[in-house]
Image: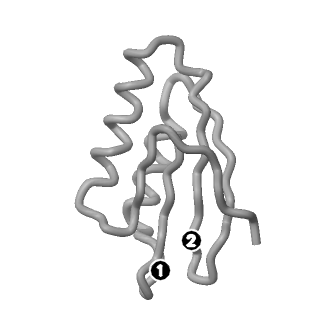
């Protein structure tokens, strides 16, 4: 899973990013992720493989929760079937 915080000239959505990181860090399965900073305005990717989640049900619940956090922001892209694509700056 890939969660990208992008910018459209005003920087990434820092409020949603804070909520996203709080959710991930507090998750009982502690899903590991890799961060890739790639833009001039603070754009960043969070790359997950979700191997820490024990069942498909847990994986679906995690993805749905991330999508709920991202809802309403046009500066967050959640892609379930993607790998890290940007190169670190």
| Residue at (47, 12) in percent of width and height | 55
Distance of mark 2 from mark 1, alpha carbons?
7 Å
Tell me: residue 11, above or below residue 64. below
* Mark positioned earlier in the residue sequence (2 or 1): 1
| Residue at (67, 66) in percent of width and height | 37
Name of the residue lying farthest toward the left:
72
Residue 82 image position (x, y, % from top left): 54, 44
- Quadrant housing residue 18: bottom left
Name of the residue lying farthest toward the bottom:
9
Local crowd at mark 2 within 10 Å, few (<14), some, or many (≥20)? some
Local crowd at mark 1 within 10 Å, few (<14), some, or many (≥20)? some
Residue 73 image position (x, y, % from top left): 29, 64
Locate the C terminus and report the quarter of the image it occupies. bottom right
Where does label 1 land, which residue?
A: 11
Residue 35 image position (x, y, % from top left): 67, 54
Q: Is residue 1 left or right of residue 23?
A: right
Where does label 2 land, which residue?
A: 43
Q: Is residue 12 left or right of residue 89?
A: left
Q: Is residue 27 left or right of residue 47?
A: left
Front-most of residues 14 and 4: 4
Tell me: residue 33, above or below residue 61. below
Label 2: state its secondary structure. loop
- Quadrant housing residue 52: top right
Q: Which mark is residue 48?
A: none
Callout 2–callout 1 Cβ contact below 8 Å: no
Q: Is residue 24 left or right of residue 63?
A: right
């Amino acid at each position: 899973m890939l969660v990208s915080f992008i910018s459209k000239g005003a920087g990434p959505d820092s409020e949603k990013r804070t909520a996203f990181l709080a959710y991930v860090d507090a998750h009982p399965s502690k899903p590991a992720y890799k961060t890739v900073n790639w833009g001039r305005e603070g754009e960043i990717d969070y790359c997950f493989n979700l191997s820490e989640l024990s069942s498909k049900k847990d994986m679906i619940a995690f993805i749905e929760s991330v999508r709920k956090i991202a809802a309403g922001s046009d500066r967050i892209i959640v892609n379930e079937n993607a790998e890290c694509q940007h190169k670190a700056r």
